[in-house]
Image (cartoon, rainbow, N blue to C red):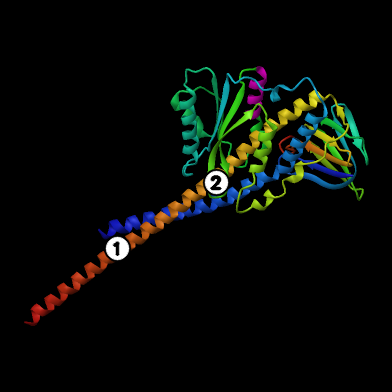
């Protein structure tokens, strides 16, 4: 009995050490991903600004295909999850949200109007299990994805959209609200909507906690309307190029945000696990001590009883 | 003029500059003070910045955009080039 309890105590202690370590690692990684995501904000603002300048400036009759709206017939669905588990409900909530969407919209493996892009092993496995054909998957990317790593995904979407194979793209990903709360958001990233993009950029900043002070200085975007610009080579070309860049940027952001959320979720999950393990160790220690004391008392009574018996 | 060069990963340059030279789709150009407002697309190449102290900075860049505003501010959006993996 003693041995058994002792073993369980050891086990719980070891687990708590591991979860504690994972918690600390996740906390550091979360901060790092947040920092990286925030570092791209100047670029994002400048790009949006340029798009707005171009939009107000020239009445071009040729809108680049990425900005054109079409009646949504065929949809690309992008699921953003992580490669690894042990992150609480991070992956399951994204997948649950997708299942709800699939039920509502009647998405079945037989339905040819939906294409799927999986980001992270968990999404890939989920889609495969349900029999959906995955157009493209993006797994084993690791943390802190670089813009270069993300560009294949954005390029696939761009190509499909320009070719007319899809009419919109929906992303299910996790929005990093604060270090303690993340929520799954369903975003339409294609066709490109400048207003939605602006929101996305603003949302990178968490609502409270570290980095939340950056929320205030969002007014950079408002500038007076520009006069005449010399545009090289042609407004259409520049607009087309910037639309493509905006798409890449958007996908990059969604990945970074999901990455930060993953670490935040893992941190919380591991924190809970460590607490539970500590609690378990405590209960086990008490049981162990009680048992030991009971055994000692029993032995003493036996010795005393034996001595009494000898005396008589 | 006020010059800012941004990439998705970081701010590459921000501050006063005397001139900036970069490759655009229409050819290599140098932007000096009070340049006419201009929007251009960049082709991969090196951006050469001469800062207010006359010191030159060389920044490798991929595709991108150049915007010169009427307020004498120049903004460059450039794709980062991974110089280490391209030997």
Q: Is residue A37 above or below residue A159?
A: below
Residue A247 location in percent, x, y?
Answer: 68, 31
Q: Nearer the viewer, mark 1 or mark 2?
A: 2
- Closer-to-camera residue (A257/A229): A229
* Residue at the disc numbered 1: A288
Characterize the local packing of mark 1: few (<14), some (14-19) or many (20 or more) Cα atoms within 10 angstroms: some
Q: In the shown orientation, is residue A163 left or right of residue A23?
A: right
Residue B3 location in percent, x, y?
Answer: 85, 43
Characterize the local packing of mark 2: few (<14), some (14-19) or many (20 or more) Cα atoms within 10 angstroms: many
Answer whether labels 1 and 2 touch (C-beta < 8 Å).
no
Q: Chain of mark 2?
A: A
The residue that appears at 19% across and 74% down in the rendered structure is A300
**Mark 1 or mark 2, which has the lower sequence index?**
2
Q: Main secondary structure of the magenta part?
A: helix
Residue A158: say if magenta: yes
* Secondary structure at numbered mark 2: helix
The quarter of the rendered structure image containing the C terminus of chain A is bottom left
Which residue lies most toward the front here?
Answer: A224
Query: Would residue A266 be visible to someone looking at this image?
Result: yes
What is the tally of numbered marks visible in this picture?
A: 2
Q: Is residue A182 above or below residue A118?
A: below
Q: In the shown orientation, is residue A145 left or right of residue A238?
A: left
Q: Chain of mark 1?
A: A
Residue B67 location in percent, x, y?
Answer: 84, 35
* Residue at the disc numbered 2: A263
Residue A12 location in percent, x, y?
Answer: 38, 55
The residue that appears at 62% across and 45% down in the rendered structure is A33
**Magenta segment, which residues?**
A152-163
Query: Would residue B79 be visible to someone looking at this image?
Result: no
């Amino acid at each position: 009995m003693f041995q058994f309890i002792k073993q369980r105590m050891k086990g719980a202690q070891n687990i708590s050490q591991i979860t504690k370590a994972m918690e600390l690692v996740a906390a550091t990684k979360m901060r790092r991903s947040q920092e990286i995501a925030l570092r791209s904000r100047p670029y994002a603002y400048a790009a949006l600004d340029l798009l707005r300048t171009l939009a107000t400036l020239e009445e071009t009759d040729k809108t680049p295909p990425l900005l054109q709206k079409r009646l949504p017939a065929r949809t690309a669905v992008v699921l953003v999850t992580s490669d690894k588990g042990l992150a609480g409900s991070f992956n399951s909530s994204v997948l649950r949200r997708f299942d709800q969407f699939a039920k509502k919209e009647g998405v079945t493996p037989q339905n040819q109007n939906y294409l799927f892009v999986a980001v992270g092993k968990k999404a890939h496995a989920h889609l495969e299990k349900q029999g959906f054909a995955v157009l493209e998957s993006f797994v084993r990317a690791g943390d802190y994805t670089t813009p270069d790593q993300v560009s294949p995904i954005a390029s696939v979407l761009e190509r499909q959209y320009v070719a007319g194979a899809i009419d919109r793209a929906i992303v299910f990903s996790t929005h990093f609200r604060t270090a303690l709360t993340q929520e799954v958001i369903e975003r339409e990233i294609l066709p490109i909507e400048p207003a939605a993009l602006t929101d996305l950029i603003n949302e990178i900043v968490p609502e409270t906690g570290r980095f939340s002070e950056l929320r205030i200085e969002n007014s950079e975007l408002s500038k007076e309307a520009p006069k005449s610009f010399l545009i090289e080579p042609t407004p259409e070309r520049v607009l087309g190029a910037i639309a493509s860049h905006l798409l890449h940027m958007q996908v990059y952001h969604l990945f970074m945000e999901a990455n930060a959320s993953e670490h935040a979720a893992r941190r919380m999950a591991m924190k809970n696990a460590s607490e539970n393990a500590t609690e378990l160790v405590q209960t086990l220690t008490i049981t162990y001590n009680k048992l030991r004391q009971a055994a000692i008392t029993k032995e003493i009574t036996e010795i005393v009883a034996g001595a009494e018996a000898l005396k008589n | 003029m006020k010059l800012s060069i941004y990439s998705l990963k970081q701010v590459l340059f921000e501050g006063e500059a005397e001139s900036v030279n970069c490759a655009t789709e229409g050819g290599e150009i140098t932007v000096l003070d009070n340049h006419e407002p201009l929007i251009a697309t960049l082709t991969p190449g090196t951006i050469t910045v001469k800062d207010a102290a006359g010191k030159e900075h060389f920044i490798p860049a991929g595709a991108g955009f150049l915007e010169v505003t009427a307020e004498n501010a120049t903004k460059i959006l450039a794709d980062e080039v991974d110089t280490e993996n391209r030997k």
